[in-house]
Amino acid sequence: MEFSFSDTQRELMVQIERFGREVLVPNWSQHADDNNIFLTESWRGLAEMGVLGMPFPEEYGGMGLGAVDTCAAGEALGRAGVDAGTLLSWGASSILCGVPIWKLGTDEQKAKYLPKMCSGEWIGGFCLTEPGSGSDAASMATRAVRDGDAWVLNGSKTWITNGPTGHHFVVTAVTDPTARPRAAGISAFVVDADTPGFRVGKKLDKLGHRTSPTSELYFEDCRIPASALLGPENYGFMLVAKLILGWERTCLLAPALGGIWHGMEVACKYAASREQFGRPIGKFGAIQEKIADMRVAYEVSWGLLYQVADKLDRGDDNVLTEAAVLKTYLTEATVKCAEEVVQIHGGYGFSKEYLVERHWRDAKLGTIGAGTNEIQRGIIARAIGGF
Ligand SMILES: Cc1cc2nc3c(=O)[nH]c(=O)nc-3n(C[C@H](O)[C@H](O)[C@H](O)COP(=O)(O)OP(=O)(O)OC[C@H]3O[C@@H](n4cnc5c(N)ncnc54)[C@H](O)[C@@H]3O)c2cc1C
């Protein structure tokens, strides 16, 4: 792989990291984390910096940049130590909801949704998971039935990021229950949250990413116009899944990549200042090994992530296996590094005073969301063994 950042991309990262440190980090509070409060001011800040609309064309209020640029921004925010909840909400809105609208939407859909998503006025979300279907997403039960010039949706979704705050959602539903494979009978729709029959259910209390609101959503005879179909009927799921896959496993993971760097810096600072046995703990080989392993994890993850993002920018979205390798390695490295940062802080790492416990709680989602790592390993093994 021959890939390196351009000077413009390096400058973009410097600016965004500075903005993250100076504006977004101080806007987080323990109170917000304890009480699952969405940080509206941080959202406005991301909009003003152009981050919410980074990949979308300028005619829709975006910056017209690519996957590499968007990842660089996400990495910079992670390096700054911006709370992972805000960045998850960004990913769910701009990437999981915005990218399918941008790539598959009609001119009318793009003109309606993208400008207000870029400006931060409207938050989006993506609805795939249901109470009975997680990893086996195509076994979903939510139905969409055509009725004249409308579709009528019935069913429920769960674990929906931005569920309580979203203005609209890309929703997947079965449109042909006889189709085999089942994924070939599923379509995607854009559903506005003020549609009669759409209801926000229970808000979910989570281990980490607590500034990102998550909830159940219900569709009860929810009647949406025929024009709400996103992409072709019965192939929406396949197209959306294919599109989201590469973008999700790069842009949504980029903050975690930056998070490894951030954790390494925090650990080094502490190891230089905390003294035991008459010297800084950073002088001990056991501590140095942990810090060295963090740097190795960062470098390997960096190569894996930008390799996939670069492929997307070159118009090649055939990234299933590379994205699975990236997702598996990076998310497990993130958990391991966050744990070692806590370990380096000793008992203080276990207290809320140093924030490192928050990074550890946040890190765990990576191995579960966006297709669990067991599912990723299945993809990798099948690609190798042809099973
Ligand atoms: C904070 C958070 C935010 C989320 N946001 C969204 C969102 O915005 N939109 C959305 O649609 N979803 C969202 N999700 C849902 C997420 O994508 C699912 O939780 C994930 O896909 C796993 O599904 P599940 O929880 O039902 O687990 P299950 O599929 O029930 O899996 C349980 C366990 O069984 C294992 N397993 C299952 N099948 C296999 C297999 N074939 N081989 C080996 N092991 C297997 C899994 O790896 C896992 O360890 C979110 C989840 C969380 C926690």
Image (cartoon, rainbow, N blue to C red):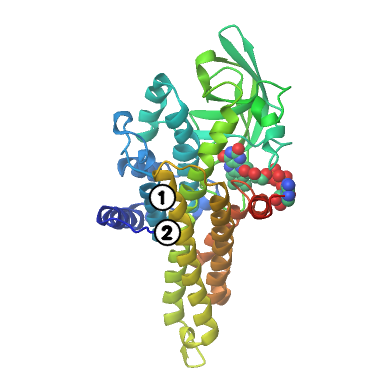
Is 242 in front, or is 102?
A: 242
Q: Is mark 1 within 8 Å of ligand 1?
A: no
Q: Report the residue marked by disc 1.
A: 310
Q: Nearer the viewer, residue 220 or 290?
A: 290
Residue at 55% x, 38% y is 242
Q: Is residue 57 above or below residue 330?
A: above
Q: Position of residue 369 (x, y in %)?
A: 60, 48
Report, in whole angstroms, how far the alpha carbon at label 1 lies from the one at label 2.
10 Å
**Amino acid at pointer 1:** Asp
Answer above or below: position of 125 versus 145.
Answer: below
Q: Which residue is mark 2?
A: 1
Mark 1 vs mark 2: which is more N-terminal? 2
Q: Nearer the viewer, residue 177 or 335?
A: 177
How many numbered callouts?
Answer: 2
Task: Specify whether tag 2 is near ligand 1 (CB below 8 Å).
Answer: no
Dot 2: element: loop
Q: Residue at position x 33%, y 33% from top?
A: 57
Residue 154 position, x and y percent, is 67, 21
- Residue 193 makes an appearance in the image: no
Kind of residue sitting beneath label 2: Met
